[in-house]
Image (cartoon, helix red, strand yellow):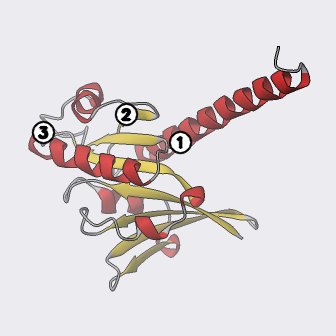
Amino acid sequence: MAKLYTFITGPNGAGKSEFLYSLGDEASWRYDETAGLEERHLVMDETLEVVLFAAVDGSRFDRLMQVPERDLLGYIVLVDSTAPETWDQARLMMLNSRGYALLPTVIAANKQDLPGAHPPEEVGAALGLESMVSVCECVATDPMTVRGVFLQLLYSVNAEIERLDALIAELERLAASGGE
């Protein structure tokens, strides 16, 4: 069975654990105390499993570096929308991840249900909406918004695949016409 991975990062207290809990049932969630990792395993069918994982200590990236780039779908950066003092750290975590492999990234502006939560657009602007980076609202304890964040990542991956398909088609057209 093929496995694809999504790395979830963000400052401590941003909601990574709650996010993973909200994605499924207890049976598909794992905690590796030795490695300090939380994982959610989603079996799509007999040929594909998607593993979403986060380091309990949000500043650790060692497990990410063990996943071959070709097996990564992208990144989800959990950000506490009520704590702007953590946004610089979240930005650095996003840059560290994208420095390993430039992949689609979703900034999940979490805790949107709490008083004082800044709008997702403001959180995204503070972290930087570069190429292949989008932002959406999140309440990590609400399975519907968590699924929406994951769907946003999958839509972003699909958009990049479509861009590659268009590039391949153009290069094939040029090759067939002799480069004219």
Q: How many residues crowd mark 2 within 10 Å: few (<14), some (14–19), many (20+)? A: many
Dot 1: element: helix
Dot 3: element: helix
Q: Which of 122 and 159 is in front in this view?
A: 159
Three-letter amino acid code of the residue under disc 2: Val
Q: Mark 2 points at which residue?
A: 135
- The reply to whether discs 2 and 3 touch (Cβ–Cβ < 8 Å) is no
Three-letter amino acid code of the residue under disc 1: Leu
Horizontal and vertical percent for residue 63? 40, 70
Which residue sits at x=35%, y=40%?
A: 107
Judge depth for marks 1 and 3 and give the one in front: 3
Horizontal and vertical percent for residue 152? 50, 38
Q: Name the residue under label 3.
A: 84
Q: Which of marks 1 and 3 is nearer the N terminus?
A: 3
Q: In this view, does 49 lie above or below 87?
A: below
Horizontal and vertical percent for residue 139? 32, 45
Location of residue 106 (image quadrant): top left
Dot 2: element: strand
Q: Mark 1 points at which residue?
A: 151
Horizontal and vertical percent for residue 82? 15, 40
> What numbered label is drawn on residue 59?
none
